[in-house]
Amino acid sequence: MTVKSATEHLITLQGAGKYYRQPNGQQIVILENINLELRSGEIVALLGPSGSGKSTLMRMVAGLIPPSQGKVEYHNQPLVGLNPGVAIVFQSFALYPWLTVLENVELGLKAKGEAPDPRRKKALRMIDIIGLDGFENAYPKELSGGMRQRVGFARALAVEPELLCMDEPFSALDVLTAENLRFELLDLWLERRIPTKAILIVTHGIEEAVILADRIIVLGRNPGRIRAELPVTLPHYRDRKHPSFQALVDQVYKIITNPELEKIEPAPTTVSPQEPRPEPKYQSLPPVRVGSIAGLIELLEDRPKTDLYRLGQELQLEVDDILPIVEAAKLMSFVEIAEGDISVTSIGQQFIAGGIDERKQIVRNQLLTNIRLVQQIYRLLEAKRNQRIPEELVLDILENHFSPEEAKRQLNTVIDWGRYAEIYSYNEPAGQIFLEEDIDKGRLRSVEQEKGEEESGGESEEMNNS
């Protein structure tokens, strides 16, 4: 993959510092003597312990706070006020709960004075790029943490910033969702699909910095200052197991931590295998987001076989936490399980290699091929003249097989999976599932036809009986 060339100096900090004066006259120094250049074509990671001023430095770059000493320049001109070429993705999702995904993404453009039509066009384009098709009219409460952060990315990128600043954007997410979103962002960057010239990311994860960055800035604290500036020349995508990767991680670790501190090995953990659950009569869907499934198989790439329990230890997940994700991946035929080992199937490998649209298509095919409830919902929708059904109809079917509470969980999962794959959409206020006109219905029907007329007839008869 060709990486953008780093030439143009976007932002320069010269002797920049930040301090606050207390009412008693005492001066608290947060940052001092920061000399830093942010150049076009590179991802820069800011690493450092808590209290080292990472977020303060990012806010100075964005023009949210002025330096107390030194200067910040944007395109070789002193920066005064907000930086017009910067957008920020925060750790918290910072979405307005009363606005839809589309309305949240439009906010930055609205603040810039964009007219409604071009504003909507740009927002929809970014929603498509970031992988939120089908959720334009959803509200934040309907979304998972990973999807809410995608909205934050789309909102920041919609204003077409030269520099995208990210303040620990993955820290509020679970491990697998963070891993998936991290690599999707990297895909968009390397493929030049996002309208930004450079990225500055604040992180506390050493491996995250080495995976993403072309340059790592290590800050010390009391006061915050640059202790090291390390170029990362490893080609993308980077293998965590490669000796060069591990050597760089170790180097950064030694810089950040006290060299005299003895290395503390983590205490060994033992995980007792659980008895497999009996297979329910009706197919049960684990309450797992597609982002978690994607994160799992991303981690399993280039691993012929991985012990499930070791994988749980590696991810710091309990068995009860990782098994539903594995089960969901198996339902979609992305992984195989044999004697406690998990491996990625050929379909899973295709998913890993695909872009956002290709991944959606693969999930769409797998759902319509393997997930009985998705097949039933889709057939019901096609049979209706207005192509809409109330969610209560699906709940009635599910409550024949599950408790009311579990039926609701099953409904939420099948709605989430179907929306991700753009098989159908969902209107929460109206409680309706519906097809949209722009869905490629012919392609969906062809997937169903592969299942055979006999199976289709059996399913239809069961739906009529229900």
Image (cartoon, rainbow, N blue to C red):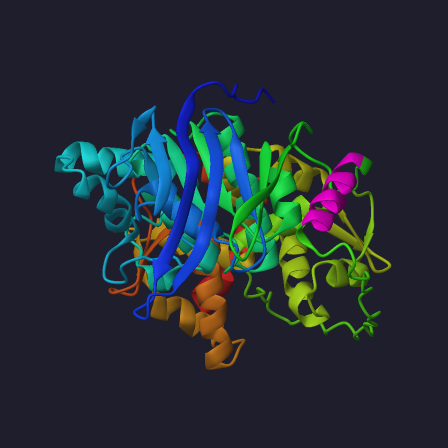
Residue at the image position 47 percent from the left and 30 percent from the top: 37
Residue 232 sits above or below residue 271 on the image: above
Residue at the image position 60 percent from the left and 49 percent from the top: 179
Residue 222 falls left or right of residue 12: right
Camera-side residue: 232 or 17? 17
Q: Which of the 4 quarters of the picture holds residue 144?
A: bottom left
| Quarter of the picture holding the C terminus | bottom left
Provide residue 318's location: percent of width, then percent of height. Answer: 70, 70
Provide residue 228's location: percent of width, then percent of height. Answer: 62, 40
| Quarter of the picture holding the N terminus | top right
Residue 386 sits above or below residue 131 on the image: below
Provide residue 90's location: percent of width, then percent of height. Answer: 40, 52
User: Does the segment drawn in magenta span residue 48?
Assistant: no
Camera-side residue: 198 or 285? 198
Tell me, yes or no, if residue 362 can be seen here: no
Secondary structure mostly taken by the magenta-highlighted segment of the chain: helix
Residue 168 sits above or below residue 463 on the image: above
Tell me, yes or no, if residue 17 can be seen here: yes
User: Does the segment drawn in magenta span residue 253?
Assistant: yes
- Magenta span covers which residues? 244-255
Provide residue 448's location: percent of width, then percent of height. Answer: 52, 43
Count of marks placed on residues: 0
Q: Outermost residue, front direction?
A: 25
Q: Outermost residue, right direction?
A: 339
Q: Which of the 4 quarters of the picture holds residue 284?
A: bottom right
Residue at the image position 70 percent from the left and 59 percent from the top: 315
